[in-house]
Amino acid sequence: MTVGFTDIAALDASDPLRGFRDEFQLREGLIYLDGNSLGAAPRATAARIAEVVANQWGEGLITSWLGAEWSTAPQRIGDKIASLLGAKPGEIVAADSTSVNIFKALTAAISLRPQRSTILSEATNFPTDVYMMQGIEAFVGGRLRAVTVDPGAVLERLDNDVAVLLLTQVHYKSGLVRDMAEVTRRAHAKGIPVVWDLSYSAGAIPVDLNGANVDFAVGCGYKFLNGGPGAPAFIFVAERHQAATPVLSGWFGHSSPFAFEEDYRPATGIARFLCGTPQVLGLAALECGLDLMGRVDLAELRRKSLALGDLFIERMELRCAGFGFELISQRDAALRGSQVSFAHPHGYEIIQALKQRDVIGDFRAPDVLRFGLTPLYLRYADIVEAVERLRDICQTRACDSPDHRHRAAVT
């Protein structure tokens, strides 16, 4: 796919998604290229949260658990996520964090293959995924081993000792997209259930969980779903696996939470994968993002995402050649998620200098500049302007400022 450099204004004028930009709170002049880390705030969210606080909490108080349907929000919102990801109603709940849901999904999957002893993932996976594997290994005292292998060797490592395979569909640094259906098919041929991390997929690329025969999946609500910082995550459990019991047996996963029984009796269906009390305010914010996403033509979203990525790469090669940037994302757009990433020895300093010029991307150690492409509020002209500001930084050596060298706690 090639975007003609002279057609930028026409591309923006004819963009069928252009009206969605006005539904986000973005100040004039800011080019926000970090929606793959934290999505922009939908304008509807502030009013929704105010209504929940003032009326449902302030006036309804505890009666809102029923009257405002707080208690069933995880299922209701989970069904909205399911409609975006090719799942059936009753296969997803919105709850907890991605890390917690990874733990739930892994332990449930392990229970399906109790005689096997390996939890398998790839090296370079997002750290929390591997940390959860390592935590399970430490907790069970050696009965299970957390194993990571080179990304290109994952499928060759599948054998009869693997209890579960954990992979991220879109790699958090490079944006490489794995073939979910083919990987799942290969794993199933060895009797291995798969847990997919969709944190960089949900709301960004087409996902068909049931079409790919996926077992378990997790993802976060604060990236492309625009649910706000710390938004509740979600967990998908295929209907055929919902009798599996995750280790985290919290009271909202009980068959009758308000019976206050001494012993745990797991709920039936997806409710079994709930744990603690629903995060009502976070769920309300997430629902605003999902209601907005529910109006989007997802095929058009993906088409624009690919075009934005191609334009970014073309402009970088035209305007920033010779400045030391190395494209680490796939040039083939079909294999690239909704981001473009470059390596540079001074990547951290460049990202800080860009922020001073009202371009927000992010940095991932050791040397990756990562630019998220969110088609609902990014314009083609934003990509062109972002690269021009980046070129100016390189030409003027603005990134050499001592202020840009101090590594902040959050990058």
Image: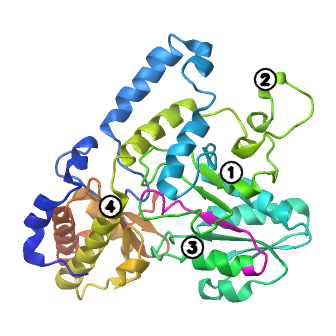
Mark 3 = which residue? 180
Query: For numbered disc 4, what is the local secondary structure?
Result: helix
Closer to the camera, 69 or 400?
Answer: 69
Question: Local crowd at mark 3 within 10 Å, few (<14), some, or many (≥20)?
Answer: many
Query: At 90% from the left edge and 69% from the top edge, which residue is drawn?
Result: 142
The magenta segment is 189-203
Q: Are marks 2 and 3 in contact (CB under 8 Å)?
A: no
Query: For numbered disc 2, what is the local secondary structure?
Result: helix
Query: For numbered disc 3, what is the local secondary structure?
Result: helix
> Looking at numbered disc 1 in the image, what kind of residue is underneath it?
Val
Q: Marks 4 and 1, Cα distance to the nearest angstrom?
A: 29 Å
Q: Mark 2 or mark 1, which has the lower sequence index?
A: 1
Mark 2 = which residue? 258
Query: For numbered disc 1, what is the local secondary structure?
Result: helix
Position of residue 387 measured from the top left corner of the image (x, y, whole percent): 21, 71
Question: Local crowd at mark 2 within 10 Å, few (<14), some, or many (≥20)?
Answer: few
Q: Mark 4 or mark 1, which has the lower sequence index?
A: 1
Q: Quadrant of the C terminus?
A: bottom left
> Looking at numbered disc 4 in the image, what kind of residue is underneath it?
Leu
> Looking at numbered disc 3 in the image, what kind of residue is underneath it?
Met
Q: Mark 4 or mark 2, which has the lower sequence index?
A: 2
